[in-house]
Image (tube, grey):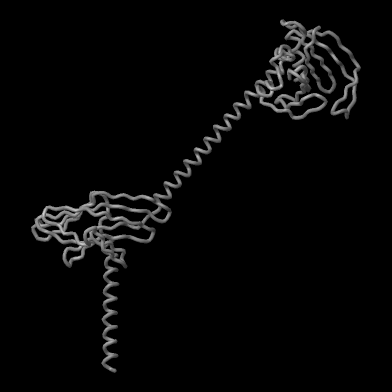
């Protein structure tokens, strides 16, 4: 019984020593590996089997690339070439993750048998993370030699690219919005320009009652939609002031336009009419005028102005002056 217990103790003792040696070995690798060259294209490592350096095994990185980056990892892929010079070599490649050593799989076998002057290539690939650093080693006979390392993944470049892409998208979106706003402003400015142009003596005289001056053309050119309908009249919100129009039921031609202007705007409009050629035909005082939706009743003046048109008929403007000036334009025969 004592012999069995002693055997178990001895076995456990040697297992503890072996475990400590393995731990020490890997701790040593951590320190050593930090001084190894970083895996990169064109990197060469030469193992010399003699002191003169005529019998060598050359390990060269033919290609190397990162891909498929994420916030926490990326893929890597490298092509390693082994070349025997001066003698035949039997070698193996390993990937060392500090606590795990993996033999690199060779399609024929795990051992690379190279004759003098021969070369062979092997692809190594995997993923790097934020915490793992990899080491690649080789062995010739019983000698195990780390020769290159791949540092742990640093996501700064990925985040920098992601941030740059995000900022680029923001700029593109802002540029798109600015272009859309500019386009809308342009459309709006053109519409306002046409609205204001319409409310001038020249256009009011020649367009009201003309066959081309229809509801559809007005709404399209001036970029407006009806704000309300009442008593056969259509109401629009022009930039300068609200405008009321009446249209022929069949042709949709605008037969009457009216609008109110206050203060200097009304006075200037009246002056512009006279300067354009409208002449006063009649005037009455003391007319009853309903202001503010019939909330205020007061007396005012009504004036009729006319101008003879080149194509026949007259443009007639009735101006009702109260708190504001109401201008109503129609086309008449005389």
User: Compared to 263, does 59 lie above or below?
Assistant: below
- Residue drawn where x is 75% and y is 20% of the image: 265
Q: Is residue 235 left or right of residue 157?
A: right
Percent coordinates x, y for residue 48 in the rendering = 13, 59
Residue at 43%, 50% in the rendered image: 159
Image location (x, y in percent) of residue 172: 50, 38
Total marks placed? 0
- Image: 162 above or below 14: above
Q: Residue furthest bottom?
A: 1
Q: Is residue 5 above or below residue 269?
A: below
* Res 242 → quadrant: top right
Can the viewer see residue 8 in this picture? yes
Is 259 or 61 nearer to us in this picture?
61
Residue 160 left/right relative to 148: right
Q: On the rendered image, what quadrant is the C terminus found in?
A: top right
Residue 224, picture quadrant: top right
Instruction: Give the quadrant of residue 141.
Output: bottom left
Q: Quadrant of the N terminus?
A: bottom left
Q: In the visual, does 251 lie left or right of 65?
A: right
Please say if 167 is above or below 234. Answer: below
Location of residue 247 in the rendering, given as x and y in whole percent from the top left corner: 76, 20
Residue at image position (23%, 51%) is 61
In the rendered image, is residue 195 in sight? Answer: no
Counting from the top left corner in percent of width and height, residue 78 is at 28, 52
């Amino acid at each position: 019984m004592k012999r069995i217990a002693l055997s178990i103790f001895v076995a456990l003792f040697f297992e503890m020593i072996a475990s400590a040696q393995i731990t020490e070995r890997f701790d040593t690798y951590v320190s050593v590996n930090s001084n190894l060259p970083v895996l990169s294209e064109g990197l060469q490592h030469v193992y010399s089997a003699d002191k003169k350096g005529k019998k060598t095994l050359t390990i060269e990185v033919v290609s190397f690339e990162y891909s498929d980056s994420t916030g926490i990892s990326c893929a890597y892929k490298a092509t390693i070439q082994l070349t025997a010079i001066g003698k035949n070599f039997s070698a193996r490649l390993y990937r060392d993750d500090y606590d795990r050593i993996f033999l690199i799989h060779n399609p024929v076998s795990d051992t690379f048998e190279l004759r003098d002057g021969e070369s062979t290539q092997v692809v190594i690939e995997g993923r790097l993370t934020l915490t793992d650093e990899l080491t690649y080693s080789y062995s010739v006979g019983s000698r195990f030699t780390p020769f290159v390392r791949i540092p742990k993944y640093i996501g700064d470049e990925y985040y920098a690219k992601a941030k740059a892409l995000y900022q680029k998208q923001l700029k593109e979106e802002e540029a798109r919005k600015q272009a859309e706003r500019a386009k809308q402003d342009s459309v709006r400015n053109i519409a306002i320009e046409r609205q204001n142009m319409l409310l001038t003596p020249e256009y009011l005289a020649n367009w009201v009652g003309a066959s081309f001056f229809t509801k559809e053309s007005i709404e399209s050119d001036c970029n407006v939609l009806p704000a309300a309908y009442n008593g056969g009249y259509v109401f629009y919100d022009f930039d300068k002031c609200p405008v009321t129009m009446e249209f022929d039921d069949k042709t949709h031609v605008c037969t009457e336009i009216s609008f109110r202007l206050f203060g200097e705007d009304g006075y200037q409009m009246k002056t512009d009419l006279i300067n354009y050629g409208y002449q006063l035909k009649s005037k009455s005082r003391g007319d009853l005028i309903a202001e503010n939706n019939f909330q205020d009743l007061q007396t005012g003046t009504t004036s009729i102005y006319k101008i003879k048109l080149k194509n026949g008929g007259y443009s007639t403007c009735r101006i009702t002056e109260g708190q504001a000036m109401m201008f109503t334009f129609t086309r008449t025969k005389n």
